[in-house]
Structures are given as C-alpha cells and as structure tokens.
Amino acid sequence: MATATLPQAQPKDTFPINGTDYIEFYCGNAKQAAHFYRTAFGFRWAAYRGPETGVRDRASYLLEQGKVRFVLTSPLGPEGPIAEHIHRHGDGVKDLAFWVDDVREAWRKAVDRGAKSAAEPHIRTDEHGEIVTAAIHTYGETIHSLVERRNYRGLFMPGFVAVEPRYNPVPVGLQYVDHCVGNVELGKMNEWVKFYETVLGFYNLLSFDDKTISTEYSALMSKVMSNGNGRIKFPINEPAAGRKKSQIEEYLDFYRGPGVQHIAMATDDIVGTVAALRDRGIDFLRVPGSYYDTVLDRVGKIDEDLGPLRDLGILIDRDDEGYLLQVFTKPVEDRPTLFYEIIQRKGAKSFGAGNFKALFEALEREQALRGNL
C-alpha cells in the first residue's frame, strides 16, 4: 500500500457538499464545556437552545470561530439517547454535519445507495425562514446530518436564539475544519472506505499501511477519503498488529467503539495560534528536540524561523505541492479519546506522513504514562 497520492478517477459525488456545516458534541455538562472552548480555544458563544427557548429535553450551545461551528449538547435528564451516548462514550462527537443544496435529494440518493437513515427529511421554521435537515448513520454511533440553508436567513437554525455574552475571549485564529479522523475496529477500515465510495461518491485520496505508520511497539493503517471539491476529508484508521497496544486500540477501548478521534482545524498563522492556545492552558504532544536538528534537511527551505517552531513543538512536512506545519493536542478529556490538530498548509495537500513516526512515539509515551501501552 503506497503512501503517495493514489491515481484519481474523476470524482463522482452522489450529491454536492458545500462544506462542513457544524460538528455536534454530546457532553455531560455542555455549559461548562462551552466555557472551556471559549476560554481555551477562543470560540465565540453565538446562540443557545434549551428550556428557555421551548426545548425540554436538552441544552445546546453554538460556538463559532472563523468558519468552524461547534454545537455542544447536554441532556436535561438521565434518560434518553443523549444520556445513553454519554454514559457509554463519555463526551464525544455525535454529528459531522454536511451543508448541502437539496436535503431531500441528498438523503434519498444516500439511502438508495445503502445508507442507513438516522432521520428523514424534516422542515424547521421560524420568522427567519426554513431549514431542511435529515441524517444518515456512519461508523459507530456517529451520524452525518444533511443541512439545507437556501431558504433561511437566521443565525443558525430554528430553535436557537442569539446571545450576547459579556465574556468574549479573543479568537486564536482558527479558520475552518481541515479534516476529521475516525477510528474503527480491526478489519473495518475498508468496509467504511467502501461506504464513503458507494454512498457519497468519495474517493480514496491517500493510503498509509502499517509499515508507514508504525513504531517499535505498535502500528495502524489509514485511508483518507475525500469528496470531489476536497472540502470534506475523512481519514479512517484501524489498528494493525504490533508488540503492544496501539493508540487506535486505546481509543476504541475507552470510547467503547468507533468514533471521531481528532478534528484538524486550519490557521493562517500556526505560531500565533499555538502560542495563544498554550498560554490558555492547552497541552500539546512534544517530540524530542533532536527532531529539529535534521528536519530542514528533509523538508528543505521554509518561510518560518525554526526557533519558534521548536519552542512550540510544531512539526513540518513537505509533499510535491508545498509544505505544511502541524501540531497535536493531548486528549482534551479524561478519557484518552478526542484531541485536536492545528494545521497550516503552505501548498501541501498531504497529512504529514514524514512526521508519523515521531508523532506516534510521542503518543506512545503518553499511553505509557497512563498505563495503556
């Protein structure tokens, strides 16, 4: 299995996807989680849905920064599917929502191609117009909502009301969702690759085998699925045989099944973004200082000074179209599940294969501290 870009047939999207509409998290305490994302990551609290707005079973907080929209949702009681999801998985991503032109057509085509429906097309209205939504299942208990906005002029969607909080932290420069990575069980990666190919018309942009993503102790395999315009990219990981437990197995154990492992968010100034995040208490994985002694021999000339990159632990890689800068947080919850990647692309369209060994060794050091390697 090669690590270079695969020969690409002309993508044939099942339906147009304009981009990521929002990512919804189910949380044990969305109010406190929203404060964390505002304080540490610089998100703005834009809207709210809950008992005060006529919704009786949940409370949701809409957070925004650049084109990134997070919805944090908590149940208002111990019963029901949201509470059950949190009980099993802890806080985690429930919904990777797509912005589409025509929900009814998109949902029908996806179901006709084999998708399992999570919600049939439904119209929501308020004084600002109407939004049409539907949803399909993907790996684990994750779903893809489909959102049609062409007849809506409101802030987000019916049921949410705008808020104007006194506390407005300065944003850290996050621009948009670059990609979202899913972890699935051993032997299931190709099944979900086929799902995205068949149901959504995605294509396999890149593949990495267990020789590329491996250390002395563990290994994994990964395939990157992309839609035709490249706005949606989903790497899918599965564990591979190794001497000890891989990071994917650790995730599956603690999340109790497949799910979203990390979300990569793009910035135009990774040094400024990561410095701000570090100053606000976000912890990042670190590679040995020796990484920087030879990295420029591998990637060639870059625009940035190496000193700040070394200080912040930012990694560098290059492909045929340019280079990228990336860094990974430690898990943001007590269960070692969800974490974030901050990425700046300077032409590169790849995912940092040259950094995999150093990165996964750093992950293994954290696993060892937790007693899970």
Image (tube, grey):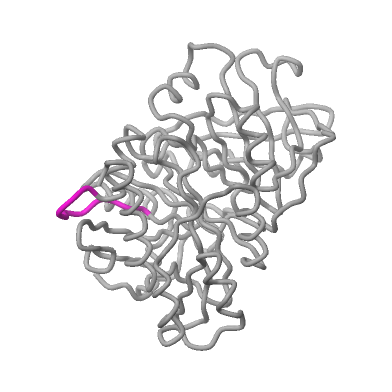
Residue 235, position as x, y percentages in the image: 40, 56
Total marks in image: 0
Work out whether residue 93 or residue 138 is closer to the camera in this orientation and state it: 93
What is the quadrant of the N terminus in the image?
bottom left
Identify the residue at image location x=63%, y=29%: 32
Quarter-of-image position of residue 351: bottom left
Identify the residue at image location x=33%, y=46%: 369
Asked if residue 239 is among those painted magenta in the image, a careful observer would answer: yes
Seen in the picture, residue 20 relative to 209 is either above or below; the reply is above
Asked if residue 308 is among those painted magenta in the image, a careful observer would answer: no
Work out whether residue 24 or residue 293 is closer to the camera in this orientation and state it: 293
Q: Is residue 148 left or right of residue 4?
A: right
Residue 298, position as x, y percentages in the image: 40, 84
Residue 104, position as x, y percentages in the image: 58, 38
Q: Is residue 39 left or right of residue 301?
A: right
Residue 258, position as x, y percentages in the image: 34, 39
Identify the residue at image location x=44%, y=35%: 334
Q: Is residue 172 left or right of residue 128?
A: left
The part of the chain drawn in magenta is 236-245
